[in-house]
Image (tube, rainbow, N blue to C red):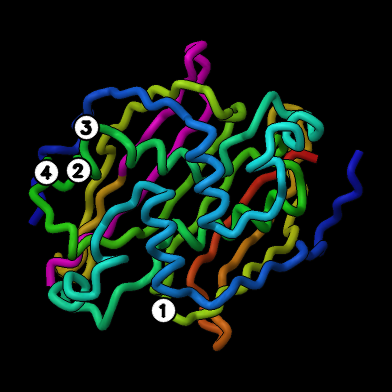
Amino acid sequence: MTNINVGDKLPSLTLPAISRCTLALFAGASGDHNPIHIDSDFAKAAGMDDVFAHGMLSMAYLGRMLTNWQSQAKLRKFSNRFLAITQLQDVIICTGEVVDIINVNDESRAKVEIFATKADGTQTLAGVAEVAI
Amino acid sequence: MLDQSKIGHKFPTFKIDVEKGRLKMFAKAIGETNPIYSDESAAIEAGYKTIPAPPTFPFTIELDGPELLPVLRVLNMDIGKLLHGSQDFEYFDTIYAGDCIEVNCVIVNMFSKKGGALEFVELESSYSNQNAKLVAKATCTLVYRNA
């Protein structure tokens, strides 16, 4: 049995600064072709300053942190709210902490609070995951 | 104001083949370095049948349907005013390269905030594999900027 305790911090993940190239690659790979993430002209016409990152890109980064910590086969739930837009050149830092050990259907699970935060401290995503232990 | 009568609307079911090359490209795009997400032998060594789809990949399966975000048409929304409010996944089994995933999606709720300046649309999706095994469920909340 894995030794996981309340208060344990997940190994954090710091990403390279978001570039237009990051967004173009993610648009193609993820199938999210919304032009607001890849076409500056479209983004400006829609009232934004410029293109901005897909929320699901940062959620995928949180997923990387979770599966780096524990095998994906143990991941039961993974959710987050999108709190702030991630702009070009932002550096995203993913962090997480075990906040509870719960029992669901005779299975012990670690409940983990997870956050994506910009280098200036702004939280962009906040969520929770459940991982079997 | 979005058409509230669309609560309960079911989108047409569709099936998507999960391709190994696509999973490798997805892993590259998110900077994933764990080899199980791009190298079949590493995945098998780690106890997986073959390359697994990473945790957020069901959202991509959904986007690969016959129409990008069909909710836009059903609710007559402008894609430029759309934001992603929240996303929840629940997992029952692993999605693997080579699987064929059936997607079913329903509009389960709609509500507004700030006097209607922001409207929210909740979509629930379920994902089943070629063995009719439910592998994941998702809830997606979209935010529509009316302002």
Q: Quadrant of the C terminus of chain B?
A: bottom left
Chain at numbered mark 4: B
Q: Quadrant of the N terminus of chain B?
A: bottom left
Q: Relative to residue B140, is residue A88 depicted above or below? A: below
Label 1 and label 4: CA atoms lie apart by: 29 Å
Kind of residue at disc 1? Leu
Evaluate if marks 1 and 2 touch, with contact meaning CB atoms under 8 Å apart.
Answer: no
Evaluate if marks 3 and 2 touch, with contact meaning CB atoms under 8 Å apart.
Answer: no
The residue stretch that appears in magenta = B123-147
Instruction: Find disc 4 in the rendering and name its residue.
Output: B73
Label 1 and label 2: CA atoms lie apart by: 28 Å
Q: Using the image, tell me which numbered label, if any, was put on residue B8.
A: 3
Between B3 and B47, the one lying in front of the other is B47
Q: Secondary structure at mark 4?
A: helix
Co-location on one chain, circles 4 and 2: yes
Between B125 and B115, the one lying in front of the other is B125
Q: Is residue A111 visible?
A: no
1 vs 4, front mark: 1
Residue B139 drawn in magenta: yes
Instruction: Find disc 1 in the rendering and name its residue.
Output: A88
Q: Residue at x 68, y 55 (%)?
A: B33
Q: Is residue B53 visible?
A: yes
Evaluate if marks 4 and 2 touch, with contact meaning CB atoms under 8 Å apart.
Answer: yes
Of the numbered discs 3 and 2, the one sitting upstream in the chain is: 3
4 vs 3, front mark: 4
1 vs 2, front mark: 1
Kind of residue at disc 3? Gly
Kind of residue at disc 4? Arg
Relative side of A44 to A32, left or right: left
